[in-house]
Image: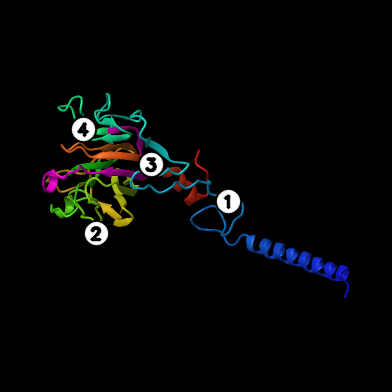
Amino acid sequence: MSKRKGSGLMMLAGLAAIGLACVLTRAAEKAGPPQPWSKWKVHDMERPAPPVVTPGTFSSSDQPGKPPSDAVVLFDGKDLSHWQAKGGGEPTFTLQDGVMLSSNLKDPKNNKYLQSKDQFGDVQLHVEFATPIPAKGEGQGRGNSGVFLMGLFETQVLDSYQAATYPDGQAGAVYGQYPPMVNACRPPGEWQTYDVVFTKPRYKDGQVAEPAYITTIHNGVVLQNHQRIEGPTGHMFVAKYPDKPLPEKGPLELQFHGNPVKYRNIWVRPLEALEHQQLTGDVAK
């Protein structure tokens, strides 16, 4: 067989394969039966495609990573423009060498909680923190701070590295409610990460239909796995939801609890519009 004839046969075979692949692709893309939970069919090519997000990068011990492209960056080490004192006013935490310190060095008697100016409901949260070195104090007096979702639900920040305290108050606890499943703390002074997925409570006819839930990953280790939150945080208080519905959204808050805990690389991804599209196929406006 000549080279020319062989090449022609190979080309025809290639075209046939491409044609067969197109037929198979079209067959695979044919929509199936209607989904009872949405207005779309199974495998419906008319359904809006998910938004494209560029993933972030991982942090190292000395360098924070980059957030995903759709994140709301609340602190990148440059300024405190996204923050205020709880209830309003100038931020009371200190910006120092690109990190945020949960202490007011200029006015030590004025150490209010720090509160984001933006408010959120369902979110993915990333926050990095380092407890003081050398470690001082014991129990709840050792590297104590906290991250409050919607300003109401606290994930405890604490130096729990080789340190004892009550389990529902150690690092990663739903404070006063559920201890972390494990203790994944790094030594004091080292940067640690919380990656949190939070779902706000849902109401029907003024009553709680679904409580809030939280998933917490500490230094890559799951501490809370879609854990039910029994109500807003309180000290020596059995959590419960108030009689009136909570607001739809609330701020992120960082607690000052007498210890100069460092924070860096704080960002959130609001999830409700994305959840709406995922569940219904409709792009939220």
Decide: few, some or many residues near mark 1? Use Cα within 10 Å; few <14, some 14-19, many ≥20.
Answer: some
Q: Residue at x 53, y 58 (%)?
A: 35
Mark linked to residue 103: 4
Looking at the image, residue 251 lies above or below residue 204: above
Residues in magenta, as a range: 115-142
For mark 3, give the secondary structure.
Answer: strand
Decide: few, some or many residues near mark 3? Use Cα within 10 Å; few <14, some 14-19, many ≥20.
Answer: many
Circle 2 residue: 181
Circle 1 residue: 47
Identify the amino acid type marked 4: Ser
Circle 3 residue: 268
Q: Nearer the viewer, residue 144 or 225?
A: 144
Looking at the image, residue 81 lies above or below residue 134: above
Decide: few, some or many residues near mark 2? Use Cα within 10 Å; few <14, some 14-19, many ≥20.
Answer: some
Q: Upstream in the sequence, badge 3 or badge 1?
A: 1
Looking at the image, residue 64 lies above or below residue 173: above
Identify the amino acid type marked 3: Val
Q: Nearer the viewer, residue 133 or 101?
A: 133
Q: Upstream in the sequence, badge 4 or badge 1?
A: 1
Image coordinates of residue 38 in percent, x first then y, are 51, 53
User: Is 127 within the magenta?
Assistant: yes
Image coordinates of residue 224 in percent, x first then y, are 28, 55
Looking at the image, residue 179 lies above or below residue 265: below
Q: Residue at x 56, y 49 (%)?
A: 49
For mark 4, give the secondary structure.
Answer: loop
Q: Residue at x 23, y 55 (%)?
A: 180
Q: Nearer the viewer, residue 17 or 276?
A: 17
Identify the amino acid type marked 1: Arg
The answer to whether mark 3 and mark 1 are in CB contact below 8 A is no
